[in-house]
Image (spheres, grey):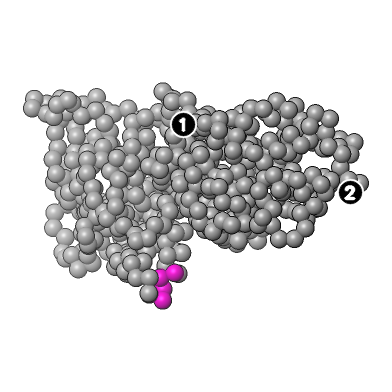
Amino acid sequence: MTPTAPSPARERFRLRITLVDSEPEIWRTLDVDGALRLGDLHDAIQLAMGWRDAHLHEFSELEPHPDTRALPQVGRPPRRWMPGDQVADAEDGLAFGGRVEQLIDEHAADVASVFAPTDGPIYYWYDFGDSWWHRIDLIEREHVDAPGASSPPWARRVELVAGAGRCPFEDSGGVHGYAEKLDTLADPASPEHAEIAAWVAGVIWPEPLVLPFEADAFDRDAADRELQLRFEVASDLSGLIRADGDGLVDEASPVVELLEGLPAPFRAALRARLRAEGALAPVQVETDAATRMVRPFTWLLGRIGDSGLALTKAGWMPPTVVHEGMTELGWLDDWIGASNREDITWPIRWLREAARRFGLVRVAKGRLLRTAAGTRLQGDPVGLWRHVAVASVGRQRSDAERMAVTLLAVEIACGRAGTLSEFGDAVANGLDLLGWSQPDGRPLDAYDGIELIRDTWHMLGDLGVFGAVSRFARSGDDAPTTEGRAFARAMLGIR
């Protein structure tokens, strides 16, 4: 993303944007360059408010009430600004209704031209179905280099000065429909509570749904950071690799690929969440923690030894070795059934499969052998820890699993506690926005997400990402540990 240079003769406009009829009032105050095109002002409002840019929009001098539009016109025709591809349809509507209005391509008009003949207000109409009307009031204007102007001189193109109230949910039915959904969310006894909560969780992704829901929550700094990224800072598409880079990620990092694949508004929302919840912090792990977490892999690599491990005729590890692993790794106490056959002792079977997929072991001439990487990393717990984290994403069996596991890593890096089903739901929501679907075009659901992340989720539990509780004793909604969150950040490619 490369910002557009501001005009030489600059004028700052302070605009107050209020969501009409919201109660409590939802508003933002923006300082914008007078040379800012209305198409860019649309982007600024979307980012400042927190909308997802999923519907049509326009700007207008007309008030959002049909009765006032029916009054006789006096003076110049009212102006409406909209994307160029909407102008023709608007002209057809005027011809049918017999009204006289001036229709202007929003990319051909700037903020200064809007307020040249009037001090406003003007209106921003978003989503013609739900009808989210925003009143835009001109609070003040000043030439940045005029005597008595603000000091130091204002140097931004767009800046979020202040605001209050969370942006409503997309497609929630307008101001009144949003209020009804908030009431339902706040009432666990409501027969519609579970249904609305599930719907909201899908709509607000990548934000997590936390109950009780805080409708008045608003992070000015996070929103302004996104405005800076859009209008001031040169960066890559993901927004994480800036021209003056901090070196924590590179172009090959899974989190970069994930962000680049999302629509811009969701990209901004995910970036804000990752920053707010510490998911972009540098990855550091102590040797003791790494040793503890990768113990299943070091046990397997050590048990294979330098000369390898002879497999049965069916290609499985010897029964004594399988039982030994279940015992030494502490998995036997909670295991039901025989623990000496690899084909039906799933923890050991999954461990060997993961080690093979991660490039740590291989099979040759009936023996299970360490690879060169497995031999090198056996005595390097921190190196093995990082290798397993990176391979957990990069060596998945399919692109769908790779993206699903990346989305799982996002949830864990952000510290989310959840069941496998809840993680599956979040993964399905993310994959949907990335363009994935069922072969017949149907959207993915939580069950699809579960199938894509199940093996990795179990492995993360075995590594202690969710604490020291065994995979069989976990409640399913244990929060990740500090080391577990660091492991998830390493999965995302954070250095």
- Depth-wise, is mark 1 or mark 2 nearer the camera? 2
Residue 169 horizontal/vertical position (percent): 37, 59
Horizontal relation, residue 474 to residue 3: left or right? right
Horizontal relation, residue 115 to residue 286: left or right? left
Is residue 395 rendered magenta in the image?
Answer: no
Name the amino acid, label 1. Answer: Pro
Q: Under tag 1, what secondary structure?
A: loop
Residue at 24%, 35% in the rendered image: 33
Q: Under tag 2, what secondary structure?
A: loop
Number of numbered tags placed on the structure image? 2
**The N terminus lies in quadrant:** top left
Q: Which mark is residue 282?
A: 1
**Could you give the CA–CA distance between mark 1 and mark 2, rounded to whole angstroms?**
45 Å
Instruction: Identify the main secondary structure in magenta.
Output: loop
**Residue 22 falls in image quadrant:** bottom left
Residue at 49%, 31% in the rendered image: 284
First to last magenta residue range: 190-194
